[in-house]
Amino acid sequence: MSTLTNLSGLQSMYSMAIAPKVDDLHTLSRKYINDPSEKNYASMQESADAVVKKSTKSRIVITTPDGTVVYDSSKGTSNTHENASNKKINENHNSRISIITACLNNTGVGMERKKSTSTGNFEEYLAVRIGKSSLQASGVVRYSLPSTPPTD
């Protein structure tokens, strides 16, 4: 894995745009994952959309513990309750390093830098587990920003 060159930008985005709303987003994501109703999806989506609007270059992906993507801000109108229920928003993300690390790490945080298979761009990722421990994980909220390709 390459060094995270834009980590300060990702941390800045997190602290300025996301941190004030992260509790709300995590609470609503957990609520939807535990009770996947249309009403709970709409609340989670509204919260995620509000965070993305605060930082226009950012991307948010929300997954269940098994890696099923229930929201991906890069997918626009594909973010619907029906598509989330049918696992059609994006491919399963259970193999993404930042998501695995967030689920299993004691801190509940994972980071990585790679080319996104969804957008085709290099991105830096900060994944935060929903839940206090890996045994209580309800899913993951992963934040990302565009990055530059690694130079080797």
Image: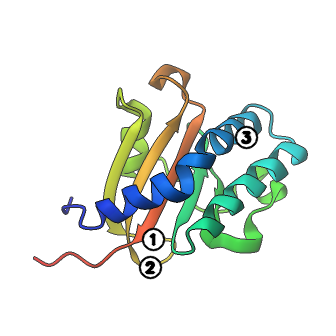
Task: Evaluate if marks 3 and 2 touch, with contact meaning CB atoms under 8 Å apart.
Answer: no
**Amino acid type at mark 3:** Leu
- Numbered badge on residue 92: none
Q: Are marks 2 and 1 in contact (CB under 8 Å)?
A: yes
For residue 34, say whether it is visible. Answer: yes
Q: Secondary structure under badge 1? A: loop
Q: Residues within 10 Å of mark 3 (few under 14, many from 20)?
A: many
Question: Label 1, on which residue?
Answer: 117
Q: CA distance from mark 1 to mark 3?
A: 27 Å
| Helix, strand or loop under label 3 | helix
Please state the horizontal and vertical placement of residue 61, each as a whole percent of the image.
57, 56
Q: Which image quadrant for residue 66?
A: top right
Give the label, 3 or 2, closer to the camera. 3
Residue depicted at x 83% and y 52%: 42
The earlier-in-sequence mark between 1 and 3 is: 3
Q: Nearer the viewer, residue 68 or 143?
A: 143
Instruction: Kindly report which numbered mark, 1 or 3, lies closer to the viewer in this rendering.
Output: 3
Q: Residue at x 81, y 48 (%)?
A: 43
Outermost residue, left direction? 152
Residue at mark 3: 28
Q: Assess disc 2: are there few (<14), some (14-19) or many (≥20) residues with their C-alpha within 10 Å of its C-alpha.
A: few
- Amino acid bearing label 1: Thr
**104 and 40: which is toward the camera:** 40
Query: In the displayed structure, does residue 90 sit left or right of residue 28?
Result: left
Residue in the image at 66% along x and 45% along y:
25
Tell me the tag on residue 120: 2
